[in-house]
């Protein structure tokens, strides 16, 4: 099939480290142009050399078929809407929205324009992640009783945009789209109740460290996100007849590295190995295939709405 021509809105580290190599190696999509406020960075990410310093000029380019948005979180929905109204399909970084209501407004635009809109939750395309859901659904560890998910790192510079509340900063927005939402899709979005939170605030006003416990269906969930704790990137699913856990310390960051999955039940302990892969590329290619009318799985917008609604509920419990 003809490659889908992508335009990048944003030329920061995520675009450079994630979608740039994903599309550079893809058979189904290519980077046609890049828009960034920094001309040097934008030009460096454009294989064709075509770049803009104005985002609107990129989405007005008739040759751009789809855009990948990696701007600060607070700008995701405004530019997603503008891009769809300009006739472009949109692949938008996580979190796609600051709240459920603005996401629902963007979905209306997607429906009225007929343009695809998808949250770039690349980890969901990882073969290990897919396998986790298969194992849970198979009943290999019985009925799920608890899920513990964590994603932390430290060493963030004080002036990093991830610390600025007005730009959608904070650990829940930054890391929650991986760890905090895992219990939701693992349990098929069972009803959430009894959310309890503990938070440490960054001097800039964002949530620096956030721990939350809640009940989802009949499952006890515990999640941890932090921008100031040494790396802890884990997933443990406990059932009445065993457990499933990710090996290593890479539950939500396995990118171009081998990974493992540990299953323990009445039959003993089993370790499944997964070859190194690029889930960003798998995601981008699924999106491109869908644009071309080919069969491909996309993260449903209904799931993104559930994620946003959950974040809304968690934030409602926080008090400064």
Image (cartoon, rainbow, N blue to C red):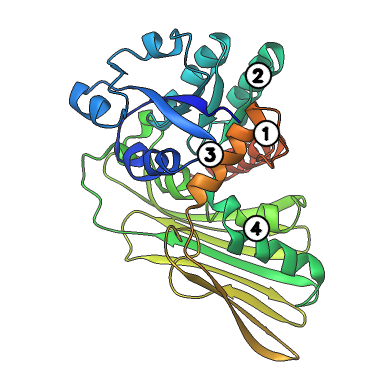
Picture coordinates of residue 190, whole percent (x, y): 77, 52
Residue that protrudes farthest toward the front in the picture: 1
Residue density around tag 3, few if under 14, some if 14–19, many if 20 or more, within 10 Å = many
Picture coordinates of residue 249, whole percent (x, y): 43, 70
Q: Earlier in the sequence, mark 2 or mark 3?
A: 2
Q: CA distance from mark 3 to mark 1?
A: 16 Å
Which residue in the structure is indicated by mark 4? 183
User: Which quarter shows the C terminus?
Assistant: top left
Q: CA distance from mark 4 to mark 1?
A: 17 Å
The answer, for residue 177, to whether it is visible in the render is no
Disc 4 versus disc 1: nearer the observer: 1
User: Which quarter shows the N terminus?
Assistant: top right
Residue density around tag 4, few if under 14, some if 14–19, many if 20 or more, within 10 Å = many
Q: Earlier in the sequence, mark 3 or mark 1?
A: 3
Which residue in the structure is indicated by mark 1? 301
Which residue in the structure is indicated by mark 2? 110
Picture disc at residue 284:
3
Is the Cβ of the residue at disc 3 closer than 8 Å to that at disc 1?
no
Secondary structure, mark 2, is helix
Q: Earlier in the sequence, mark 2 or mark 4?
A: 2
Q: Earlier in the sequence, mark 2 or mark 1?
A: 2
């Amino acid at each position: 099939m003809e490659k889908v021509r992508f335009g990048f809105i944003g030329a920061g580290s995520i675009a450079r480290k994630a979608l740039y190599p994903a599309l550079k190696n893809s058979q189904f999509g290519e980077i046609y142009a890049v828009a960034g406020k920094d001309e040097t960075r934008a030009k460096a990410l454009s294989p064709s050399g075509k770049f803009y310093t104005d985002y609107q000029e990129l989405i007005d380019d008739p040759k751009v078929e789809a855009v990948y948005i990696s701007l600060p979180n607070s700008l995701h929905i405004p530019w997603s809407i503008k891009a769809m109204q300009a006739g472009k399909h949109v692949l938008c970084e996580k979190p796609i929205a600051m709240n459920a209501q603005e996401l629902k407004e963007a979905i209306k635009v997607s429906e009225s324009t007929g343009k695809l809109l998808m949250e770039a939750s690349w980890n969901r395309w990882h073969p290990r992640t897919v396998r986790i859901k298969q194992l849970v659904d198979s009943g290999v560890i019985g009925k799920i009783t608890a899920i513990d998910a964590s994603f932390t790192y430290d060493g963030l510079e004080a002036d990093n945009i991830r610390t600025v509340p007005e730009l959608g900063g904070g650990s829940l927005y930054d890391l929650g789209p991986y760890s905090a939402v895992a219990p939701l899709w693992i349990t098929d979005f069972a009803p959430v109740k009894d959310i309890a939170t503990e938070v440490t605030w960054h001097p800039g006003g964002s949530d620096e460290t956030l721990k939350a416990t809640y009940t989802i269906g009949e499952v006890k969930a515990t999640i941890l996100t932090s921008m100031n704790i040494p790396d802890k990137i884990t997933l443990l699913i406990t059932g009445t007849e065993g457990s499933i856990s990710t090996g290593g310390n890479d539950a939500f960051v396995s990118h171009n590295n081998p990974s493992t999955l540990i299953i323990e039940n009445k039959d003993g302990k089993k370790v499944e190995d997964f070859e190194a892969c690029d889930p960003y590329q798998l995601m981008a290619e699924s999106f491109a295939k869908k644009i071309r009318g080919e069969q491909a799985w996309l993260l449903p917008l209904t799931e993104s709405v559930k994620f946003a609604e959950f974040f809304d509920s968690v934030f409602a419990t926080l008090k400064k």
